[in-house]
Image (tube, helix red, strand yellow):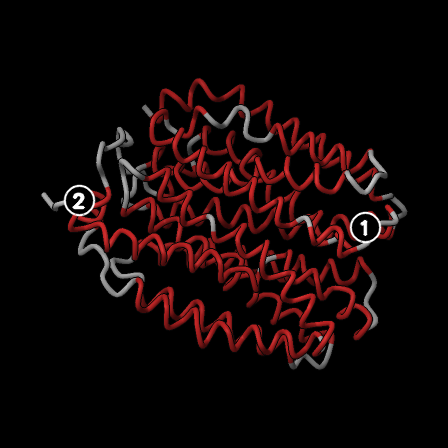
Amino acid sequence: MPNPHKSAPRKRQWLAGGFLLTFSSAFGQTFFIALFAQDLKSEFGLSDGAFGTLYMLATLASAGVLMWIGQVADRRFLRPVGGLTLAGLALAAAAMAGVAAAWMLLPILFALRLLGQGLPGHIAMTAMARWFVGERGRAIALAAMGFPASQAIIPIIAVTLAGSVGWRMTWALSAAALLAVSVPLILILFRTEPEAADEGTKAGAEAPAAPAPRDWTRSQVLRDPIFHAVMPGVLAPPFVATGIFFHQITIVQSKGWDLAWFVGWYAAHTLTTVAAGLATGWVIDRFTSARVLPTFLVPLVAGVAILGLWDSAYAVPVFMVLSGLSIGSANTVQGALWAELYGTRHLGAIRSLASAGMVFASALAPGLMGYLFDAGLTAAQQLLMLAAYTLLASGLLAAVTPRLGARAG
């Protein structure tokens, strides 16, 4: 049996690699792309609905491809997979810097969404779930910290750069950072991987959690009613958060707030996301992820409702904190849940179903909200609709939780 003290440096490398992948995914995430939405709409004469449709189509296409290609995370060695993914993301960012026509946005956004939002986080969460057992919840929580960290840091840098060198140069510098920093680092951090999934999990385990009864295949999971019952709740955070952050400029303008005020509170969102993720990881390692499911969406319901109902600018920090609690928990819960329910042998293929669903949800929200804005629905009305959907999804999770607990052991 491997000595856990001797394996500690390798474990730290894997955790750092997972963090790097989730952090680097920022350049394909909605919160980053949305910062340039007004520039792109003005440059090419696009309405909210037209740009939202392009974004939706590109993201839907990336979801379909992710469902097919996501099983690459089941490969024995993830070093080349991670390196190629981040290199491709850099090329997509460079293409955005030179975009010359509206039609070019579709393939560029597709590449950004697949290689940014989709694959890096999918690879990172699959690797952590495979390589750690007794510490799975904490490992996933630590790797997932890259999501809120990038959301707190990168938008402020991007807004500053765009104001000084322009939006195109900001994209070009983003591509350069990925090629110069992220790609070499992931090749270093993942240079020594477990020789097999069992060895990796032994190295990361101190008190092994109860395994799933068997290792399910993806086709078996698709026939499982529990999977379909859980998905509405799993899809709620990406659907709601993507819709709000994509249309943040429209929402801010409708409330009479300043965009810098809204973006400035990303730090509060980050702190609560990190705290919730770490706390959730601790709970999962002791009680399984099923214990968290009934309540993790409740803060998001309250935060979105407050953002819709209040015209005071202080609705922003309240929303950022409450939504951060749910999103931080969601990142960790979703990373561990599928391994608990279905085992790790085909985890990449199984997670790709959920990941594709989340990408689909993030694709639907911008386009749907854009059309509703064009049709005359206000930001407040749409925010209350999002809160209602999340509340219903939370109720469904609470109803199926007893069966989840029995399945996860």
Where residue 4 is drawn, which disc sits there?
A: 2
Q: Secondary structure at mark 1?
A: helix
Identify which residue is drawn at 54% across, 46% down.
357
Where residue 32 is drawn, which disc sits there?
A: none
Residue 310 position (above or below residue 260): above
Towards the viewer: 17 or 67: 17
Q: Position of residue 204 (x, y in %)?
A: 24, 44
Q: Position of residue 61 (x, y in %)?
A: 57, 60
**380 left or right, relative to 23:** right
Q: Residues within 10 Å of mark 2 (few under 14, many from 20)?
A: some
Image quarter where the C terminus lies is top left
Residue 115 position (above or below residue 179): above
Residue 144 position (above or below residue 289): below
Res 239 quadrant in image: top right
* Picture mark count: 2
Q: Secondary structure at mark 2?
A: helix
Question: What amino acid is found at the position of numbered circle 2 in the picture?
Answer: Pro
Res 105 quadrant in image: bottom right
Q: Position of residue 165 (x, y in %)?
A: 70, 79
- Asked if labels 1 and 2 touch by Cβ distance under 8 angstroms, the answer is no
In 3D space, how far apart are the residues under numbered discs 2 and 1 (Cα atoms)? 50 Å
**405 left or right, relative to 359:** left
Residue 49 position (above or below residue 178): above
Identify which residue is drawn at 81% across, 67% down.
46
Q: Circle 1 sits on which residue? A: 252
Q: Residue furthest left?
A: 1
Image quarter where the N terminus lies is top left
Identify which residue is drawn at 59% across, 27% down.
394
Question: What amino acid is found at the position of numbered circle 1 in the picture?
Answer: Val
Towards the viewer: 333 or 316: 316
Ranked by sequence position, the earlier of labels 2 and 1 is 2
**133 left or right, relative to 331:** left
